[in-house]
Amino acid sequence: MVNLIIKFVALCRTSDLKVSTSEALDCISQLQLINPVDEFQFKAVLNTNFVKTRRDQKHFDRLYSLYFHNLKLDVSHLENQDQGVDLYQEVLESLQDAENSNELEKAIVEFLSGNPLLLLEKLQKLRTSELISSQALKSNLGGLSGRLEIMLQINQTRSRMTRFMENQAGSAEIRSRKQIMDNLNRRLDVALNMLTEENKPYNEGLKQVKSGTQQGKGLGEKFFSSLSQSEVEEMRQVIKQLVRRLNDIVTRRWALKNRGTLDIKKTLRRAGRYHGIPIEVIYKKRPPRKGKIVTICDISGSVWSAARFMLNMLFSLQNCFAKVRSFVFISEIAEVTGIFEKHDINEAVEKVMTEAGIQYEALTDYGETFVRFKKTYMDVLNKKTTLIIVGDGRSNHFNPQDQILGEMRDKCRRVVWLNPEPERFWNSGDSEMNLYKAYCHEVRPCQNLSQLTSFIQELVL
């Protein structure tokens, strides 16, 4: 049992699931208190000790299934189980005895024999090299050659197994050979799935607002991209009225919160003026606690019309929060907080759209934006910050750098993604929304005034 747990811990560490020595020792000691044959109890003990957060749950489940189920040799249905095991060993020995076998081929043979550690190390190195090469090339295809090499090696191993089985026609029954071959092919299929599947964190708590739950009437239903000039002016007036109303509500809330908790000493002292009757209640004064907002807005051509209204609304709400830091990007990122502080809202939006100090003709690159944000502005995020990202998630097949968004999430209280593109187009073409939403607390479409208003009211109220 101890060796089994030690091997599984090594598997977890190789796959970047952090397990400390003390956690492994606790797990071994707790297994002595249960019936280890009962898989429900056994898995519960491992899960309790090895899974730190819910976002690690999916990764743990995948490794558990791989180690304790997918690599299990099933010969229970064979009439002659000993003969099946012998044939299984002969296949593996034939693969191991191949001349000029490389490290990758040895790792695949070890995987077939029930030891996935070497292949997992190869896959982990591949993901690391993909990250380094894609950063240098600004491409999301940097590790394609490495994946193709592993895929070709798996297919070659499958072919060699098939040829060996065909040459062993008289050594075992046809049914036994077929079942052993099916079992080995299933293992190779598992290896291919490990190669091709996306290693995304578990994010069951994601709030994904659908377009159908945000209905408006008249002007509120029209897409930002389809508004005429007169409708744009009308919408600006509607936004001003909404912002004024929200500011009034927030101001009243702060006034109530400002009185703080009951000050018993001062209340009793004041009650002396009225023969001990506490007619006047005194509260402890405290400054209002406001949230912090950081907005990162895509102002490329694909979201140009929607970005103007997003910037208008988010700027107008800066009085509702202690600090609002605003950034815009296409392939470069620039802070525009100072522009909003020095100019009227309409003039500020025009300056952001034309004078933000970025290349407006460049191709949209979310990955490069996240890299530059991490390098220069990461310290603006803390556990009181709500990070709002506005964009369609289309990165022109550049490296999405989604792991940096994960680091940004770890530093924030909340990450919200507003997508001005219809939901039916998400994850099509060069869209990376399927990757990015795994690191968000909330994603929602934001194509018209009704959807934008709904979000702002939830954010402020």
Image: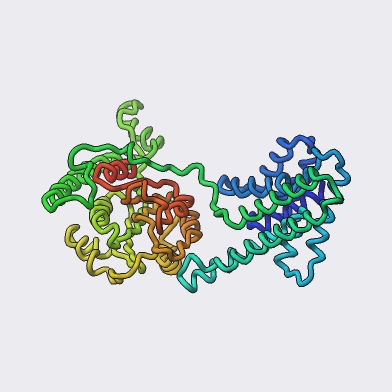
- Is residue 85 shown left or right of residue 327? right
Residue 218, picture quadrant: top left
Is any part of residue 55 visible from this angle?
Answer: yes
Residue 244, picture quadrant: top left
- Is residue 191 shown left or right of residue 84? left
- Is residue 233 shown left or right of residue 62? left
Of 49 and 247, nearer the camera is 49
User: Where 350 falls versus 53 (above or below)?
Assistant: below
Question: What residue is drawn where x is 33% and y is 37%?
Answer: 212
Residue 62 locus on image (x, y percent): 64, 48
Q: Quadrant of the C terminus?
A: top left
Residue 71 locus on image (x, y percent): 73, 49
Is any part of residue 377 visible from this angle?
Answer: no
Of 291 and 413, nearer the camera is 413
Asked which colour scheme the image uses, the reply is rainbow
Question: What residue is drawn where x is 54% and y is 52%?
Answer: 200
Residue 392 locus on image (x, y percent): 35, 55
As drawn, which residue projects farthest toward the left?
230
- Is residue 168 shown left or right of residue 263? right
Of 392 and 239, nearer the camera is 392
Question: What residue is drawn where x is 82% and y is 46%?
Answer: 1
Residue 434 locus on image (x, y percent): 45, 51
Of 70 and 333, nearer the camera is 70
Tag count: 0
User: Where 210 falls versus 428 (above or below)?
Assistant: above
Question: What residue is drawn where x is 33% and y is 26%?
Answer: 275
